[in-house]
Amino acid sequence: TADKPQDFIRQIIAEDLKSGKHSQVITRFPPEPNGFLHIGHAKSICLNFGIAKEYNSVCHLRFDDTNPGKESTEYVEAIKEDVRWLGYDWGEHLYYASDYFDKLYRYAIQLIEMGKAYVCHLSGEEIRAYRGTLTEPGKESPYRNRSVEENLELFERMRAGEFDEGECVLRAKIDMASPNILMRDPVIYRILKIPHHRTGDKWCIYPMYDFTHCLSDMLEGITHSLCTLEFENNRPLYDWFLDTLKTPCHPQQIEFARLNINYTVMSKRKLLQLVDEGHVNGWDDPRMLTLSGLRRRGYTPASIRNFCDIIGIGKRNSWVDMGVLENAVRDDLNDHAPRVLGVLRPLKVVITNYPEEQVEYFEAQNHPKNPEMGTRPLPFCREIYIEATDFMEDPPKKFFRLGPGREVRLRYAYFITCQEVIKDEEGNVVELRCTYDPETRGGSAPDGRKVKGTIHWVSARHGIPAEIRLYDRLFTVEHPDMDKKKDFKEFLNPHSLDILTDAIVEPGLARATLDDRFQFERQGYFCLDSKDSRPDHLVFNRIVTLRDTWQK
Ligand code: ATP
Ligand code: MG
Ligand code: MG
């Protein structure tokens, strides 16, 4: 919006358009299809697609698929679905780095012809050793000064499959003494005898990220290539390829701080480990901060876009508290989610002075602050369920809910008083016998008698059973992957999932759809589980609690 201060990237873009450097801004979001997108990617998506939207321009979705061993069409499809779900559209601008393999190959040949690339037979280990360190210049490869002809022939043979994996690579010939180690003759092609999910067996040499990325940006006419700070040192290389090849246009790489959230891990490699080793139930496990996990958990796209807006775009890496993400969805749901009653851990209450066959209906508000959301009839009868935690046999003074001889208000209904506690053989409370005061219909007593507590309930005759899944953070420490001695999985929270199988929810929830999100009064926000819920076995996920109750 116009009145909001612009982040530094938007300032640069506005400047470039004003000065006439560009007449149109074109951005791209370049995921590698080697896993599902996570909330960190959402930051990049909202930035790139957001800018395109603001300028009525386009953002390209480009799959950076140069690593066939780890990539698949399944990931491509999942990524498309997630970007669309977040509310963004690439229109016709769907690209694959693999579509450029022929062109990239020709650019590599051009570099060789310019004397700017050579085939090197050092092993990966030797290349690393020759590369030197920050304080020590690198050593030149013995293959560095081969003739152009020899390099052309060797590169052609690489492509023809005459060498084994690891036998040789193509390297850019830049500067082995550069203070930037990435400039010390980086590898630009390696041999991988792995079929590619799009090009099949056509290639056995694949271009490296740095070589591919700048040229893909250039080929698509990207104006601003936005990436995370770790790529700052790659920028000279990005520019070197484009400058050396004298390409017709030269996109500008700009780096911004990546998103880090505490109590989670945020790299596809680690998320994949959690999936593969069964610590979670798939990429879309509602505890995962993947976009598919957040979607299944019940997060709205608007809340994630809003979250990205709140955290903003900066140049310094920092940690964002998980509570900020949770607040973003809570704010959205507080405004939009209809209120319902659901009892998670039911305790039966028999209202002994209520007529056996009678049913009456109370008009319940769907939203306390928004009358336009209407009302619904809530059935009430002699037997109801209340939350087991709303009763204490020997309550402390400050406990304003139900106890022997105590009176509470049933939400929308009557005052009831607990007269008798029924227990099983082991002494567990299994039922309460209460009486109600017919004069208190609607929640107040004509004699002015006050009760402090109001509790929720569901009619035993009308309520429907449901399974409820409560989620907690996946890890018990703020920075699970920053411990030098321990693997991040040692910090998994053993109580991150709590399954309640006996819940009872109000009858209207039988009509809930996968698009609905509800506030279960006093319990939090819930939605149906898209994978496991069935009409004859409702499964609800808790999206988030009502308040930020999480204790550090
Ligand atoms: P990961 O380390 O999780 O595998 P990645 O950067 O390797 O992430 P890509 O598929 O290459 O994954 O990412 C696509 C785009 O998303 C890149 O432009 C990258 O900069 C951006 N991105 C990835 N993670 C984050 C993050 N945590 N915060 C902001 N942007 C991110
Ligand atoms: Mg990447
Ligand atoms: Mg990665």
Image (tube, rainbow, N blue to C red):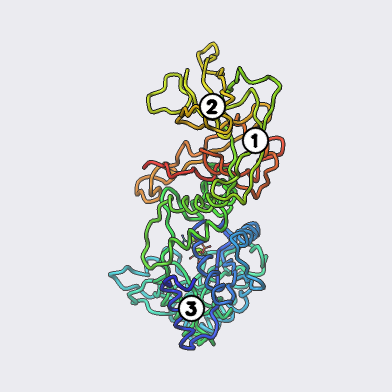
Q: At x 46% / y 36%, what residue is drawn?
A: 494
Q: Nearer the viewer, residue 352 or 472?
A: 352
Crowding at label 3, few (<14), some or many (≥20) Cα neighbours within 10 Å?
many
Residue 415 drawn above or below residue 16? above
Q: Nearer the viewer, residue 484 or 327?
A: 327
Q: Earlier in the sequence, mark 2 or mark 3?
A: 3
Label 3: element kind = strand
Q: Which residue is mark 1?
A: 378
Label 1: element kind = strand
Q: Which residue is mark 2?
A: 415
Give the x, y percent position of residue 21.
Answer: 48, 87
Q: Earlier in the sequence, mark 2 or mark 1?
A: 1
Residue 91 drawn above or below residue 352? below
Q: Earlier in the sequence, mark 3 or mark 1?
A: 3
The three-letter amino acid code for the residue at tag 3 is Tyr
Q: Which residue is mark 3?
A: 118
Give the x, y percent position of residue 536.
Answer: 71, 35
Q: At x 65% / y 57%, what residue is drawn?
A: 74
Label 2: element kind = strand
**Which mark lies nearer to you, 2 or 1?**
2
Q: Is mark 2 within 8 Å of ligand 1?
A: no
The three-letter amino acid code for the residue at tag 2 is Phe
* Residue 430, quarter of picture: top right
